[in-house]
Amino acid sequence: MTTPQAPSTPDQTWGAAPAPGAPPRPGWTPGKKIAAGAVAVAIVAGGGAAIWAASSSSASTDSAAGPGGMQGGPGGMQGGAGALGSALHGEYVSSDGNGGYVTKIMQTGEVTALSATSLTAKSDDGFSKTYTITSEQATGLATGDTITVVATESGDTATATSVTEGQTGGQGQLPGGGQGTPPSGAPTRTG
């Protein structure tokens, strides 16, 4: 048994202009416009949440990782920036305290040369750098000591902002406390 179908009207093609004399089609009512806008907002918000969730996952398989791969919450970072605590040397950017930023150099290594105005440190991987220091920073240091230096660089001159005896690298600690200052309790010489 077949179902009767409505006769086709070839003059009513999708997107075609209405037939002359036909009443105009009504536009969208304000209610339909609001509903369509709400649906669009929901789609964009859902897509944004999906992108955030996908981009905030870490390469780590640890399910406790949060956005950016940080683990353990504030003060307990084990991934991301907290991994800098075990770095031998490198650069990072921190706030200058006046709304700007400053690039800092950090190195942990052994003092291989020392004077009242300069210090040369050599990291375990063989990297060696000479820093300008103050006589106050040099006080109490000796060749062979293990230190962590945080410095700024201008041209070819690296000027130490802090020299800390021993290694930083406690979990959750940025080298030099993240601002060119040592972790609390560490002996330091600032200049």
Image (spheres, rainbow, N blue to C red):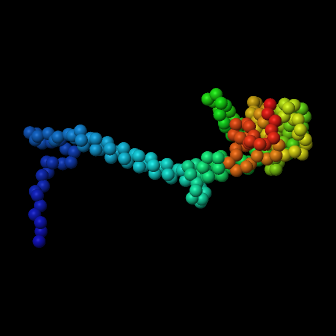
Quadrant of the snapshot with the C terminus? top right
Furthest toward the top, the residue is 98
Q: Is residue 140 left or right of residue 176?
A: right
Using the image as rendered, state which of residue 27 and residue 142 is in the foreground.
142
- Taking 183 as reference, is 1 above or below it? below
Furthest toward the front, the residue is 185
Q: What is the quadrant of residue 106 in the picture?
A: top right
Q: Position of residue 49 (x, y in %)?
A: 45, 49
Residue shown at the point (56%, 51%) measured from the top left: 66
- Taking 100 as reference, is 63 above or below it? below
Q: Is residue 48 left or right of residue 112?
A: left
- Taking 93 as reference, is 5 above or below it? below
Quadrant of the snapshot with the N terminus? bottom left
Q: Position of residue 145 (x, y in %)?
A: 87, 45
Q: What is the quadrant of residue 96 in the picture?
A: top right
Q: Position of residue 18 (x, y in %)?
A: 15, 42
Q: Position of residue 13 (x, y in %)?
A: 18, 48
Furthest toward the left, the residue is 21
Residue shown at the point (49%, 48%) measured from the top left: 52
Q: Is residue 6 left or right of residue 94?
A: left
Residue shown at the point (14%, 39%) measured from the top left: 24
Q: From where the camera sits, is residue 11 visible?
A: yes
Furthest toward the bottom, the residue is 1
- Taking 96 as reference, is 7 above or below it? below
In this rendering, the count of numbered labels is 0
Q: From where the camera sits, is residue 160 visible?
A: no
Residue shown at the point (77%, 42%) measured from the top left: 185
